[in-house]
Image (cartoon, rainbow, N blue to C red):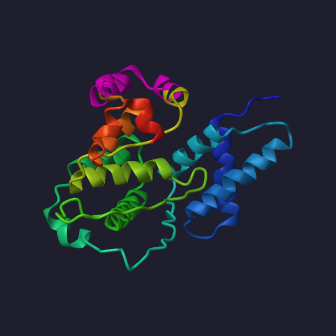
């Protein structure tokens, strides 16, 4: 039996969209079409992996005009203080503009998809606290997304926008070290060099060290000085 290529899968997904959708398909339409094609091929013993689904979605999103679903927000209006619109003009979007250019030029994303990501990034950033506010404040939030819903690109957009707005420390809690190793292994040599330049090993610290730093920052020097493991347990 012939092994499916990503082109075969993408062609079938595109055909599914043309048959079932009138007008511009949404991101949900694209996800549904990918799942339908996956089920269809599974009947004949051809299994499409999650990684292949993600690659097909990225490829078709770049080629087709897709309306990106921006989701919904649940906000506590008693604690939410809008601030971004007042500071937008003064913020130099150094990091976001470079990430935006990467998506458009290297990843070949459509303009409307990047524009939607830009809008969602601003809306999410506005839900955070203003890093330039001199008063004490605390904000907590949770973003949920389905598989292939664009979580990675969304949090990368938010990180870049937060850095532009003035956030000095941004901690990304990712998967296991093995998952990171596999991701790095897939990079080209030039990408690896750039990655190591931007993220040198000297900046790497584990969760116990993070706990020690946090306890020191919170004003608990007696806990921090007890060691990384005891800080983490506290």
Image check: 93 left or right of 70?
left
At x 29%, y 24%, the residue is 202
**Magenta-colored segment: predominant secondary structure:** helix
At x 31%, y 44%, the residue is 220
Residues shaded magenta: 181-202
The answer, for residue 207, to whether it is visible in the render is no
The answer, for residue 104, to whether it is visible in the render is yes
Q: Is residue 130 above or below residue 153?
A: below
Image check: 92 left or right of 6?
left
Farthest left residue? 90
Pick the residue in front: 135 or 46: 135
Q: Position of residue 182 (x, y in %)?
A: 53, 26
Pick the residue in front: 185 or 202: 202
At x 38%, y 20%, the residue is 189
The answer to which image quadrant residue 48 occupies is top right
Q: Is residue 30 above or below residue 53?
A: below
Q: Position of residue 190 (x, y in %)?
A: 34, 23
Image check: 69 left or right of 41?
left
Farthest front residue? 222
The answer to which image quadrant residue 20 occupies is bottom right
Which quadrant does the N terminus fall into? top right
Which quadrant does the C terminus fall into? top left
Image check: 228 left or right of 135?
right
Farthest top residue? 189
Q: Position of residue 136 (x, y in %)?
A: 24, 64
Q: Position of residue 25 (x, y in %)?
A: 58, 64
Q: Is residue 195 magenta?
A: yes
Pick the residue in front: 226 or 218: 226
């Amino acid at each position: 039996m012939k092994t499916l290529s990503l082109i075969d899968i993408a062609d079938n997904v595109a055909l599914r969209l043309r048959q079932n959708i009138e007008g511009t398909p949404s991101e949900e339409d694209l996800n549904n079409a990918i799942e339908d094609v996956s089920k269809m091929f599974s009947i004949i013993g051809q299994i499409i992996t999650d990684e292949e689904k993600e690659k097909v979605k990225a490829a078709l999103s770049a080629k087709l005009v897709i309306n990106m679903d921006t989701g919904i927000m649940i906000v506590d209006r008693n604690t939410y203080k809008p601030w971004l619109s007042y500071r937008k003009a003064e913020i130099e979007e150094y990091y976001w503009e470079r990430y935006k250019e990467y998506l458009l030029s290297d990843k070949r994303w459509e303009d409307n998809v990047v524009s939607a990501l830009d809008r969602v990034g601003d809306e999410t950033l506005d839900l955070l606290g203003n890093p330039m506010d001199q008063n004490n404040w605390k904000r907590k939030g949770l973003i949920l997304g389905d598989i292939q819903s664009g979580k990675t690109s969304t949090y990368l957009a938010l990180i870049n926008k937060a850095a532009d707005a003035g956030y000095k420390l941004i901690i990304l809690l990712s998967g296991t070290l093995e998952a990171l190793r596999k991701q790095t292994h897939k990079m080209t040599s030039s990408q690896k060099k750039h990655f190591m330049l931007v993220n040198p090993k000297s900046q790497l610290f584990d969760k116990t060290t993070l706990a020690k730093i946090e306890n020191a920052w919170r004003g608990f020097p007696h806990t921090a000085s007890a060691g990384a493991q005891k800080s983490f347990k506290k």
